[in-house]
Amino acid sequence: MKKLGKILVTFFVLIGVVLVGLSLFVHFYLTEDRVKALVIPQAEKALGRTVRIGGINVGLFSGITVKDLTVKEADSHTDFVSTKEFVLRYDLLPLLQKKIVVSKVRLDAPYVRVLRDKDGLFNFETLTVLAEAEPGKQKPEDTGKPASAALPLALTVNKVIVDNAQIIVRDALKEIPDTDVKADLKVSLDLGRDPASLRYRGDLRFEADAEYGKLRPHVFGKSDFDQDRLDYTVDVSLEKEQVRLSGEVKNYAKVPDIRLDVVSDAINIDHLLALAAGLPTASQNGEKEPSKDVKTTSPAAPGAALPPGLKAAGEIKIGQTLYKGLVVKDFLLEYGLDKGVLTVKDLSTKVADGQVSSKIKADLNKPGLAYDGQLDVESVKAERLLACLAPKVKDMISGALQSHLTFSGAGTEWPKLRNALIVDGTFGLHEGRVSNTPVTVAVAKLLGLDELNNLSFKDLDGSLHIIKGQVALKTRMTGNDVNAQAKGTVGLDGKLDLPVSLRFSPELSEKLKKRASMAKYLVDETGEAEISLKLAGTVTRPYPTLDTAGVQKKVKETVRKKAIEELGKALSGKKKDTKPNAASELIKGIFGQ
């Protein structure tokens, strides 16, 4: 035992002597000036920039500390990259087990300045190391041997700490927002001996201010991540508007599976559009207009630009949205993306005292985009909706709108959209009014009744079918003064081919009789007149005409009935033995009744 103890003591003494010797060698040989002489010329050669180091301290036990490292711009005066302090700490004992354990890597106040000049060239593009790495500059020698996949030593880094990092972005062309970013990063990683076995975990906190025209958003975000997933929360503030983005990304290094939720209490779209109007226009430097002789190719499928296998899901919630004076409340949109198919599972919102809901499916794998879905509208005040969507007609139509539509189509631009759109459904407008529309103005002028230019109704409902740019319309209106029915077509280009039947109240029928002598033949036993019209022209410039065949038929029927009635009275008065019913039957037979 005593002998073994002496051997152990001798072994540790030898280890101590070796370590002390190595420490002295490092201390006296790797002096600050000598290390600078070794490092700085090589760094300047690799970067093509002036490199300055305030101080370097290398110790066998203390590790490496570099202070005030700066890489200059091409002008050799302005800072391109800098850091106050770089610290590398490592453990020696794990080397005995063929492991490299870095206990800490720390960067204090690293600074990066990214500039783009008026010629569109970034300041980092002139770095020598990037220029040499351009395709065609160097070709690696083909030795015929597979690259080594394993490292000779296992590598573990307990802590990587980046404190007070700052990134500055400036663009002389004003195409990229001027951005100031501050960030803190902490990461631990275990590389092992095989890159495939890489494991890491960390967290990131950042804050950014940007300026792009009149837009000056402030962004604050945080993220926790490892090799399998990344979760995040990002708060964006733009003057009075605030939006939170949150979610996670699974398997982001291979096939991303994204969860993105968007939440905001209130968004003023009018305000955002006003700010967007002040954005700088894109630079036209180097851009050429496409030749008129070049044939345009068919649009590619939108899904082709997505990463293969990408999946996404989430929801958008906005408490209140203001757009052109229209208040939209409790907006909710739930969506999913899988295999290139985007599905809006639920879209609902409260607007204009009513409710709107929809479901949509869009196939991004098809060129030009293909989609189908349904839209439901319940008790929406039409006049308030039109004030936003079509201000020119906001005072022409009012009432509570109900609708159920199913639709399918492809493309987003005319004429493809017109030719591919198919819509089926029903609609209703209740307790409303139609005033001063081109159609009512034209019909009122034709019939000489000003009352037709300001119609109130209890119900206006019907069905429609859209295919190949034509709307097959069937509608019915009931009101106090006028009942109407229409069945025909309206083109999506505004062309009208719409027969209309109007039935007037007794009061309005009397006015019609005073304006048109033939109108007395259109009044039935209830005192109501019925007229058939045909609307041609366009929605904005309609051309109504009387259905002469229908009017003639109505007049003949009225005259025939009147003749039968009068002759029946005459025959009944001359032949007292002839029963009135028998005389009527005889006359009806004569007139084909």
Image (spheres, helix red, strand yellow):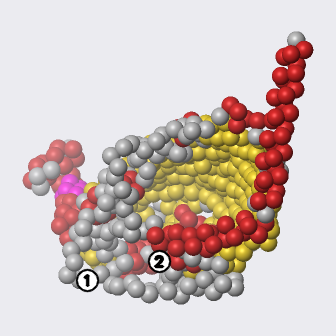
Magenta residues, as a range?
A: 561-569
> Which amino acid is tagged 2?
Asn
Kindly indicate whether the residue at mark 1 contacts the one at mark 2 (C-beta within 8 angstroms): no
Position of 556 compared to 374: left or right? left
**What residue is shown at x 67% (from left), y 67% (from top)?**
38
> Looking at this rendering, what residue extends furthest in the right direction?
2
Residue 352 vertical position relative to residue 175 in the rendered view, above or below: above
**What residue is shown at x 61% (from left), y 58% (from top)?**
351
Image quadrant where one finds the N terminus: top right
Q: Can residue 479 be seen here?
A: yes
Residue 500 lies in what quarter of the image? bottom left
Position of 224 compared to 586: left or right? right
State yes or no: residue 115 in magenta: no
Q: Residues within 10 Å of mark 1 (few under 14, many from 20)?
A: few
Q: Nearer the viewer, mark 2 or mark 1?
A: 1
Residue under pointer 2: 436
Q: Residues within 10 Å of mark 2 (few under 14, many from 20)?
A: some
**Quick one: SS at disc 1?**
loop
Query: Which label was assigned to residue 291?
Result: 1
